[in-house]
Amino acid sequence: MKLQEYQAKSILKKAGIPLPASTLATNAVQVKRIAAEIGYPVVLKAQTFEPGRGKAGGVRIIQTESEIENISNEIFKLVLNQHPVQFILVEKAFTFSKEYYLAIFSDLDAGTPVLRLSEAGGATYLEPDSFKNARVVDRPININLGLQDYQIRGLVTTLGIDPSLWKQLQLIAHKIYDVYRHYDATLVEINSLVVTQQNQLFALDTRISIDNQSLFRQESLSDSLDQSYFGWEERQALKYDVDYHSFPGEIGCMVNGLGLAYLTIDQLISLNTLPAAMIDIHGGATSTSISSSLEMLLLNPRVKAIIINIFGGMTRCDETADGLLQALDKGFPKKPIFIRLEGTNDDSGLDLLHKNENLSFFGTTEALVNAAVGWLREEEE
Amino acid sequence: MSILISAESRIMVQGITGRRGHFHASQMLKSGSQIVGGTSPGKGGDWSHEGRLPIFDTVRDCVDATSADVSVIFVPPHSTADAILESIDCGVKTIISITGSIPLQDMMVVKSALKNSDSILVGPNSPGVLVPGIANAGIFPNDIAFQGNVGVVSRSGTLCYEIVDTLKREGIGVSTVVGIGDDPIIGIDYPTCLELFEADPHTDQIVLIGGPGGDSEIKAATYIMENVTKPVIAYVVGESLATSILRPFFSRSGSLSLDSLGKKTGALIDASVRVAGKLSDIPAIIKS
């Protein structure tokens, strides 16, 4: 889970990392008041998870008070990938002489945290070509020992960073490692880390991502999770512990497991058809989450037909059938349902379902998807 | 005859009184696996499964009393790392974590502990290890496969079922099925499984099932090129996403990088692996 910029900054501030003064605003009047407090020039930054914020005009430098309300209103009118901008971060604009990139991230293949320092900070870091030419140094961290001073020294000497900055950099590196550990992050990034005219290191911008699998023990964060950002389906999915993805097609899919999701999508793509939604109920789902998942597909107006592809190991087919019947008995819109139910307790699961007239049954993923797509084609003609 | 587990394996279940642990211990008993007991802290001294299985408070007690050398873990995600570390500490040889979605930093601690031990971790988020007719150490549906000479390794659990079911329909038996797990950080990887299959006299051919995320299939391809003499047949699910308009929807989710999407099939072909265009094509390739 990515944190919004303002959330990430408040975490780093709390950790004692030097950052430019900034405050969050929800309307143009607030923006103007905050800017007056902070002092011009200021940067207005649209708070969004969507990429391309800068290009869309969501980041603007404001020199004087006269233009600030108009520009704030322009930013609040922006809609990035269907998500309207609701918050602007008002931040003190800074001049600096040099920028670096500093981060702790998770190397999933090696299974370790990594400390990374690069002389290509700012936008340069994000451009593949300039990144290739810049020097980037990584140090894997033994999670049981923690980040060591000598590792940081290794980085700063490799990059030839001025010794007058070493102490500050060491302190910041330790602090972001502490943030990484404390918040179960997968990434704590300072980009860019700038050197001011007073030879002070300052964190101009930051990104923090939190491990979704650890959210249960990060209560302070899951409470601050901006749920208004999610649609109804995403909120349902969070509530019932299933994965929900929305796509541009017309077939709603429910599967148990990521592999089966991809297999189903591969088969759809091979028939030039796209899914409308993909719900992964995971292994061992309860009848309640299965019932809620089917409900999401039945209520989605874009979903014309439904594919249910279950090969139960930990997912019990009798429990699956029970959940499906719960949703089917609720009087939602009727849609053709193409189902493949196999694995643990499949006999009793199929017995429960066989009476329902909306369902047609298949033995393999291929036959299942082919039938659903065939029905959709006929319907279109 | 098999890899990772065998007829001699003495299997214990961590979390044997939980809903899932209890149910799948029954399934494993039905399959004829040699289950010797389980743990459930606070319930040590009780018996479960109609008195067939002794319950212990700790892995140490269970191992001392039953000589268990394989543990199958069903405890909830927040205590899974602790359960794995407990088994490592007690010298359990093969540790299989059915539980998935383990906090990533917990898994980093586990990976570090594994380096200093002789234990092998399968998973997390694994369906287990299946040797048909001998032992089902995990959650494989019973009777899903029969004995034969094809070894199967897959990250995805459901695709493990899917492929062995497909093989069974075509009359092909398997030596061992290993689900290495679909979590971002896992224990045993493709190369180690391939090494074990290469050395297993009862495995003649190897089926490798891959998927999107990370580059472990590419590492497998390199390993195969340099070390594997037995024929390998592969299928990588989700490769069609690389050129599909669906790709951006996936790149925004999940923690593994999609940089290698669409390149895995090519890397495996370069390693002389026979790659199936569809999962259902695999039996024909095996028979050819």
Image: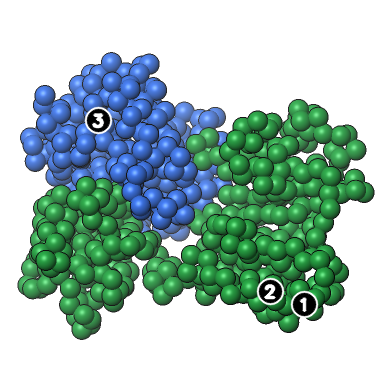
Chain colours: A green, B blue
- Position of B58 with respect to A114 (left or right) is left
Give the residue pinned by disc 2: A72
- Residue shown at 17% from the left, 55% from the top: A369
Given the current orientation, which residue lies at the most extreme right position?
A198
Report, in whole angstroms, how far the alpha carbon at label 2 lies from the one at label 1: 9 Å
From the viewer's perspective, is residue B101 above or below residue A332?
above
Task: Decide which of A260, A43 is in the foreground and name it.
Answer: A43
Front disc: 3 or 1: 1
Q: Distance between the residues labelled 3 and 1?
A: 61 Å
| Disc number placed over residue B275 in the picture, else none | 3
Q: Which amino acid does label 2 sit on?
A: Ser
Residues under numbered marks 2 and 1 in contact, where contact means CB atoms less than 8 Å apart: yes
What subunit carries mark 1? A
Q: Element at badge 3?
A: strand
Read off the residue under disc 1: A32
Residue B286 left/right relative to B200: left
Image-quadrant location for residue A377: bottom left
Q: Can residue A177 be seen in this view?
A: no
Q: Residues within 10 Å of mark 3 (few under 14, many from 20)?
A: many
